[in-house]
Image (cartoon, rainbow, N blue to C red):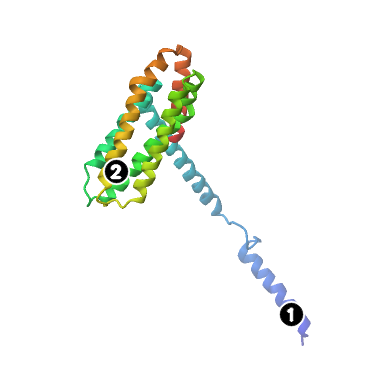
């Protein structure tokens, strides 16, 4: 008759043999044969997403770059922003979702535009001893941010929503007019061809990453 110790030893041996046969000797923490396809699919999806975003940026900035030199690119962005304002002004208080989506688009467009000017054009103006113009234009960007802040706080069906948008549009329109008709033309006339090309390249570079 087998002792208790012998029975336990026999049972352990049987369990070990059974476990080894069913798991093929793999740890309970092993990934298994299906792990590789899953990991590959995840990495592939991430790569596709990155490529799609990269392609979107290239398309968007490529369309703007087709406008020409740096000042023409920025003027085209002014027109795009003003067109968004006009779409906002054509809404009524029942179109709250549309108003929010248009404000989101406008915010992104103005943020991208401001980044290009503040990181490239205004520093170049200061380098060319046009400090007063650069400082004035950059200070107006602060008021742009204030309008965006106020509109985001307001209900999209507020009675004074359109009035606020109209005031905002006026500020951006006057800002754009000063740049396009006064500051940028005189600045560009003083540039060499190499300087113009460099500023254009930098505006496109920063616009690409912000697109």
Task: Say which quadrant the C terminus sits in.
Answer: top left
The residue shown at (41%, 29%) is: 137
Distance (Cα) linking label 2 and label 1 = 84 Å
The residue under label 2 is 164
Residue 165 visible in rendering: yes
Mark 2 or mark 1, earlier in chain: 1
Q: In the rendered image, which quarter is residue 18 located in? A: bottom right
> How many discs mark residues in the rendered view?
2
Mark number displayed over residue 66: none
Say which residue appears at 37% left-offset and 43% top-offset: 148
Q: What element carries label 2?
A: helix
- Residue 8's mark? 1
Name the residue nearer the viewer: 210 or 93.
Answer: 93
| Quarter in which the N terminus is drawn | bottom right
Q: Where is residue 204 in the image (x, y as percent from the top left)?
A: 44, 26
Residue at 30% x, 36% y is: 169
Residue 112 in the image: above or below residue 8: above
Q: Where is residue 135 in the image (x, y as percent from the top left)?
A: 46, 28
Task: Give left or right: position of 65 versus 36.
Answer: left
Mark 1 nearby-residue class (10 Å; few <14, some 14–19, many ≥20): few
Residue located 29% across and 37% down the image:
84
| Most foreground residue, 173 or 191 | 173
Task: Give how far across and how far down residue 129 sits, in percent.
Answer: 49, 18
Above or below for 113 versus 125: below
């Amino acid at each position: 008759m087998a002792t208790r110790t012998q029975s336990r030893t026999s049972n352990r041996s049987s369990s070990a043999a059974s476990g080894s046969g069913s798991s093929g000797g793999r740890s309970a923490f092993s990934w298994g044969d299906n792990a590789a396809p899953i990991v590959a699919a995840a990495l592939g999806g991430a790569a596709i997403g990155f490529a799609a975003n990269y392609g979107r940026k290239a398309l968007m900035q490529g369309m703007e770059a087709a406008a020409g030199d740096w000042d023409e690119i920025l003027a085209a962005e002014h027109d795009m922003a003003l067109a968004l304002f006009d779409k906002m002004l054509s809404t009524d208080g029942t179109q709250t979702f549309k108003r929010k989506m248009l404000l989101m688009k406008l915010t992104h467009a103005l943020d991208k535009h401001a980044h290009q000017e503040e990181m490239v054009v205004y520093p170049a103006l200061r380098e060319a001893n046009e400090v007063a113009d650069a400082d004035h234009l950059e200070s107006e960007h602060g008021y742009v941010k204030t309008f965006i802040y106020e509109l985001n706080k307001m209900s999209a069906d507020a009675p004074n929503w359109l009035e606020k948008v109209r005031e905002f549009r006026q500020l951006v329109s006057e800002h754009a007019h000063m740049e396009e008709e006064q500051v940028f033309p005189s600045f560009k006339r003083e540039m060499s061809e190499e300087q113009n090309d460099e500023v254009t390249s930098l505006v496109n570079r920063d616009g690409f990453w912000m697109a």
